Amino acid sequence: MNNLIANTFALVWQEAAVGRWQTIKQGVVEPDLSKFLVIAALLFIIGVAGVLTRRNIIVIFMSIELILNAANLNFIAFTRYLQDTGNLNAVAGQVFTVFIIVVAAAEAAIGLGLVIALYRNKETIFVDKIDLLKW
Amino acid sequence: MTLSGWEAAFFWVFAIAALVAALLTILAHNAVHSALFLISTLVSVAALFVLLGAEFIAGVQILVYVGGVMVLFLFVIMLVNVGAEERGGETLFNRPAQVATSAVFLVLLSLGFIYAIRQGYEGLLIRDNLITPEQRAEVANRRRAQQQNLRPAATGTSRLSEDTQLVGASLYRFAALPFEIASVLLLVAIIGSVMLARTARQEAATGDLELKDEG
């Protein structure tokens, strides 16, 4: 736990300190793997925020698509990293991504079918009104 | 792995576009606007895929997500009534207590991400530093040689990537069983969504439901 706090503090503080200006500039001019990981993490967090806070079930499905896309971005970034550090023909991440896209498409089709069935029965698409199982 | 020059500029443009559009996706009042912002996020992420050298995945992303899944989303949005939310008659988010709880959860999640990315990336840097400069130069030479062997594109300035071929080959050679399972999954999804989206009249027509007499 101490380590976690120290690391977080170090990340926020050291990167902002004047001595680290060169590092930041280097990171902006030549983005590397970590920048892709940060972008993917932010997309994931935005997706989770959408799933947790929105009431509209269709927007919740869209947020799930965002989460899956963040995972795809990580896979592709790591594939490129592996290619640049010796494994020239590494495409495993791209193959994984194809499967993730397939699962996402299937999930969207089933989920939207459920939304339509639900709308026929309950006349609402707000998740807090869908409380048939609530005792 | 670093991008440089124009690649770096395009990286920041598309990364920021993806993040802003993702934020607007979960903040928009109108579900159709949400869908359009999600499309721009997906296109920006596809551009990031191109920057990472995964042209095939970028194409699949555009075709399947933007061309297929998002059209499905838009159809469903127009089938169900979203007028109430659009007119501002309905609140956008859950109750404040739930939103506060999820905010706490999200802060914890982002702290975990910061910790994990920092730790993992430092580990990768240590691993990279174990590679001697000679090995690094050898990898770069092999990469350059591989690039030289590729056929030039129609413009003559760039070369056609063989990544698509590699992806296809490994999809059938090493991932044949998951590939078949994925096809079964898609079949189940097709049949399942058709079954779920039937109206009561259609269910009665196939004998799955007894339609009560009206009057």
Image (cartoon, rainbow, N blue to C red):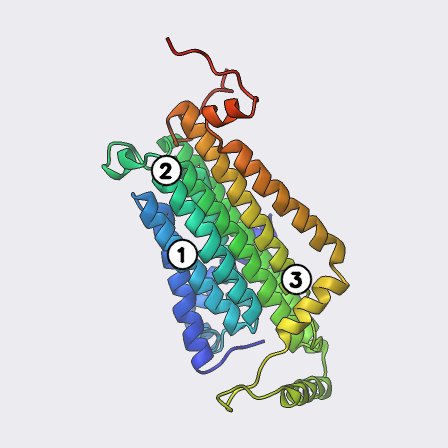
Q: Is residue B102 left or right of residue B129?
A: left
Question: From mark 2 to mark 1, how far is it between C-alphas?
Answer: 19 Å
**Residue, x 42% and y 27% (percent of image)?**
A120
Picture layout, residue B39 above or below residue B85: below
State which chain disc 1 sits on: B
Q: How far from the left and from the top, in percent, is residue B111? A: 52, 51
Are the two marked residues, 1 and 3, in contact with CB atoms closer than 8 angstroms? Answer: no
Picture layout, residue B174 above or below residue A120: below
Q: Quadrant of the C terminus of chain B?
A: top left
Identify residue type, mark 3: Val
Q: How far from the left and from the top, in percent, is residue A84? A: 64, 77
Are the two marked residues, 3 and 2, in contact with CB atoms closer than 8 angstroms? Answer: no
Identify residue type, mark 1: Ile
Identify residue type, mark 2: Leu
Q: How far from the left and from the top, in percent, is residue A62? A: 44, 46
Q: How far from the left and from the top, in percent, is residue B141? A: 68, 89
For label 1, the SS is helix
Picture disc at residue B79: 2
Question: From mark 3 to mark 2, how far is it between C-alphas?
Answer: 35 Å
Picture disc at residue A95: 3
Q: Is residue B149 left or right of residue A107?
A: right
Mark 1 = which residue? B39
Q: Quadrant of residue B44?
A: bottom left
Q: Quadrant of the N terminus of chain B?
A: bottom right
**Residue, x 72% and y 79% (percent of image)?**
B131
Picture layout, residue A122 above or below residue A16: above
